[in-house]
Image (cartoon, helix red, strand yellow):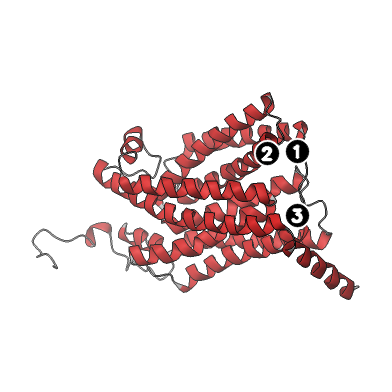
Amino acid sequence: MEVNGVEDVGEQLVGVFQNPGLLLGIPLALAGAVFMSLGAQYQHRGVEKVERLSGAQGTSGLSLDQLRRLLTRPSWLIGTLMLGLAIVCQLAALVRAPLMVVQPLGAIALVITTLLNARISGHSPTKKSIRAIVCCVGGIFLFVFFAALFATEQEVADRELFVILALLLVVIIVLGACWLILRQRMRALFYVIGAGILYGFVATLAKVVIKRIEAGHFEWITAICVLALVAAAAVGAYFVQTAYSSGPPDLVIAGLTVVDPLIAVLIGMVILGEAAAAPPWALVIYGVAGAIAVFGVVELARYHPQVISDSQELGIVRGSDGSTGGQRPEDTEQRPEEPNAT
């Protein structure tokens, strides 16, 4: 029995490398991940600059004035261009390969962004943050390996589209209500998860719209999908920019590259039937791999060196040993009569 199972997996693996769509879709997805990491770094720099110029933090939501200022920041515009290229690569990959394969490959952006942010910010990764990143990337790549073996594409009927659009409407209402009621207490993790959920729907709708346009079926429901896609992308983009103001870029990318594909894959499995050919043991592996990746995001939000450093600057005591030394915020400030250390 075990020998037959191994032979089946081997045959599936050989079939993957004989699939020209996958052979082209995977490199496009990886190129998109590189552009995503560069775009995140530039956009994060632009948001930080706008916060300094406006004299107001955007942790509870960027204001209209701050959004307007972003449009004049060269770094933010360059980052937006990079993210645009990432979207083009991802859409091109979606045309060539199943959704379950393309989406998780964005996790490589987390590794690149972590290295860039460590070099720019001076916050070297700690053992706990590295462990969290390994969980994020390892969980997602374990998922994509088995997804590539068993994922199949199915034609999306109008009924499935109605279900996806209805779920997206519910998600937008729930996230909007949470933002309106609890935004003063929300931090980067909320915005990252919210954006990841919305982008998962965006990827799914983009796949459907592209396939329907290719088939020459651009009817009213396809137009509704385009409108829903634009709305979800706009809300998700706002959440991402707000997340940059309350968290480091690699934390934002970690959430997006884990939550986004998980949502897209769940839609693909449950609604679109892309996992119909997967055996039960593969579904178990999907669940375990997804849980490992989500655990990595939560751990990175807790133990990212830049997050810990920012918390210490606010005088927050972290851990039972009191890593800030129990000092009050005013104790850490330089007294006026003291000379400058430089």
Q: Tally the marks.
A: 3
Q: Which residue is mark 1?
A: 156
In the picture, measured across the screen, residue 339 lies left or right of residue 128, that is left
Q: Which residue is mark 3?
A: 151
Distance between the alpha carbons at the discs numbered 1 and 2: 7 Å
Among the two numbered marks 1 and 2 on one chain, the one whose residue lies closer to the N terminus: 1
Residue 2 in picture, x, y percent from top left = 87, 74
Disc 3 marks a residue whose amino acid type is Ala
Above or below 200: residue 254: below
Disc 1 marks a residue whose amino acid type is Val
Among the two numbered marks 3 and 1 on one chain, the one whose residue lies closer to the N terminus: 3
Instruction: Please tell me which residue is depicted at 89% across the width and 72% down the height of the picture.
Output: 4
Q: Which mark is residue 262?
A: none
Instruction: Please tell me which residue is depicted at 75% across the width and 36% down the height of the picture.
Output: 160
Disc 2 marks a residue whose amino acid type is Val
Q: Is residue 305 visible?
A: no
**Label 1 CA crowd tier, 10 Å (few <14, some 14–19, many 20+):** some
Outermost residue on the bottom side: it is 3
Quarter location, residue 117: bottom left
Quarter location, residue 101: bottom right
* Front residue of this view, candidates 342 and 274: 274
Labelled pair 1, 2 in contact (Cβ < 8 Å): yes
Distance between the alpha carbons at the discs numbered 3 and 1: 15 Å
In the picture, measured across the screen, residue 55 lies left or right of residue 200, that is left
Outermost residue on the top side: it is 220
Among the two numbered marks 2 and 3 on one chain, the one whose residue lies closer to the N terminus: 3
Quarter in which the N terminus is drawn: bottom right
